[in-house]
Image (cartoon, grey):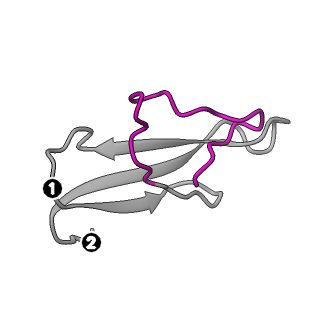
Amino acid sequence: MLRLSGLNVDATLSDAGDVMMSMRPMMATLTMDPVVVPAGKVSFVAVNNGALVHETVVLPLPSDGQGTRPTGADGKINES
């Protein structure tokens, strides 16, 4: 696997659910290893194990804490 400078975090992206049987929009799973890292230079090495195209976006932590970023009616987060 590719190794970059700094601490490497392996990010595995996969499909969640049955693509052919579900009428819902497809969801994805994201697994990180390690899940906690110290401050400093970090490189993410992403591998897509799914049949669909997935992406990983790293956003700054909201000022009011982890898990507080609002999600729209469409299930998406405003990335701006």
Quarter location, residue 20 = top right
Q: CA distance from mark 2 to mark 1?
A: 19 Å
Residue 2: mark:
2
Horizontal side of residue 25 vs 4, given as left or right: right
Q: Quadrant of residue 70?
A: top right
Q: Where does the magenta region start and end?
A: 58-80
Residue 62 numbered mark, or none: none
Amino acid under disc 1 = Gly
Residue at the (49%, 55%) spot, across then down: 57
For mark 2, give the secondary structure: loop
Left/right of residue 70 with respect to residue 46 in the rendered view = right
Disc 1 marks which residue?
A: 40
Image quarter (top left, top right, bottom left or bottom right) of the N terminus: bottom left
The amino acid type, in three-letter code, at marker 2 is: Leu
Coordinates of residue 6 in the picture (x, y in percent): 15, 64
Main SS category, magenta section = loop
